[in-house]
Structures are given as structure tokens and as C-alpha cells.
Image (tube, grey):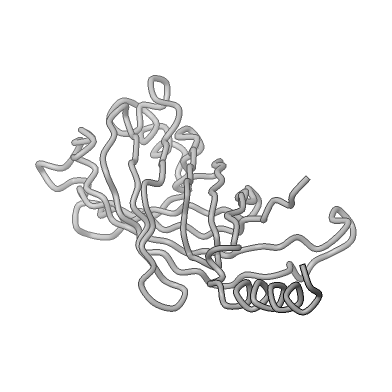
Amino acid sequence: MHCGRLFRTGRVALATALLLPLSVTAAPRTWVIDPEHFSIAFSVAHAGFADVMGLFEEAEGQFVYDPQTRELESGEVTVQAGSVFTAHEERDKHVRDGDFLDVDAHPDIRFVATGYEPQGEGRGELRGDLTLLGETRPVTLDVRINQMGEYPFGGGVFSDPPYVIGISAETTIQRSEWDMTYGVEDDIVGDAVELRFELEARRQEDG
């Protein structure tokens, strides 16, 4: 092959590569949720007078996400049902028993992502299946990506600052759809449960 032809061929190849969309070269990465920066809060009406608020204190999860294409390949979160906390010891015992979470029979609450639909800058809808009390039902969460980049804390426990994504999400479920019906009929405990998630997840580096 003549040098001129080789040069032209190389130039065409380079131009083609530069014109390819980012999605062709982008690669999804695994992100692991930092358990120290993962908050799961809920609120539910109590006899119509006020809402009871609470937390789940133990949870873990990860997801595979490409921030360039905004495509989610998979995701899963597992919550320890017995870690529920409402700032009242006797109430916490009640929430753990068979009237509500039945943690002895169902120690884990599990969410598995089934799809993500971007809806504007930094926002989207996350669809998934929620398994609670042994029943699995679809849910949809409103998601906001707050920030993504190198963590502002380096050194110490980190040899290099990790690359982190910060996410807020929320949804409302009807607990009776999972056969948790205690107090619903007489309006002692509300059926609707508002859920809110705040999390930071670290990108896993290759190798």
C-alpha cells in the first residue's frame, strides 16, 4: 500500500472514531452503596393525628450504571427488616412482629431494579420489584442525581479520593398490597407509607 493511501485510510479511521457517539465507547460501571451514607426513612399516618417517622438502620446494595448514556443495567438493595427504628422501643417491637414486618419469618426486604427512564437533567424514574413479607410487587421511584465526581475526602482510609455519585429517591406504597393490613380498616395506622432514600455510592475501579 502506498504511503499516501495509508495516510488517507488512517485519517478516515480517526475522523470516524471522533464522530462516534459517546454511548459507543462508554462502559457501564458497578457502583457500591456506602452503608455509612445510606439513609432509608419512612412515614405513615397514626390515627389521622400525626405521622410516625422511622428509619431502617441496616441496608446494602449496588447497581451497574453508565452515567454517559444514563443507562441502568441492574441494581439491588437489601434492607434488614429488624433494623427498623422509630425512637420508641415498644413501638419498634410491635413493628417487628407479625402485625407489620414479621422479621422472624421475613428478615430481608429486597428491591431489584427492572428499568430506569431519564426524565430531564439529573432526574428519572426507577422501576423495580419490591419483596416484602414474601410478596413481590412493582414500584416506581422518583430519582434525583445530586452530584457525581471525586469525593472531597482523600487520604486516611482512602489512598485516593473515590469517584462517588449522590442520589435522592422517593416513592409512596400502599402496604396493604403486600398484605400488611393491621390498622388499615379502622384508620388507626395509615395504608400509605412514604419512603425516602438518600445514598452515596462509590464507583468500582477496574482491576
**Percent coordinates x, y for residue 157 in the rendering:** 86, 53
Residue 193 sits above or below residue 184 on the image: below
Counting from the top left corner in percent of width and height, residue 110 is at 42, 37
Q: Residue at x 60, y 74 (%)?
A: 16
Number of numbered discs present?
Answer: 0
Q: Quadrant of the N terminus?
A: bottom right
Nearest the eye: 35 or 191: 35
Residue depicted at x 10% and y 41%: 185
Residue most toward the left? 185
Among the 4 quarters of the image, the one containing residue 130? top left
Q: Nearer the viewer, residue 71 or 7?
A: 7
User: Most extreme residue toward the top, as rendered?
Assistant: 105
Q: Nearer the viewer, residue 75 or 102?
A: 75
- Left or right position of 116 against 147: left
Q: Position of residue 119 (x, y in %)?
A: 35, 72
Q: Quadrant of the C terminus?
A: top right
Among all residues in the image, which is located at the extreme front?
A: 2
Q: Examine the rendered structure and indicate whether residue 16 appears above or below residue 128.
A: below
Residue 186 in the figure: left or right of residue 33: left
Q: Is residue 111 above or below residue 120?
A: above
In this rendering, the answer to whether 88 lies above or below 51 is above
Q: Nearer the viewer, residue 105 or 54?
A: 105
Image x and y of residue 41, in percent = 44, 54
Residue depicted at 35% across the width and 47% down the height: 128
Residue 10 falls in image quadrant: bottom right
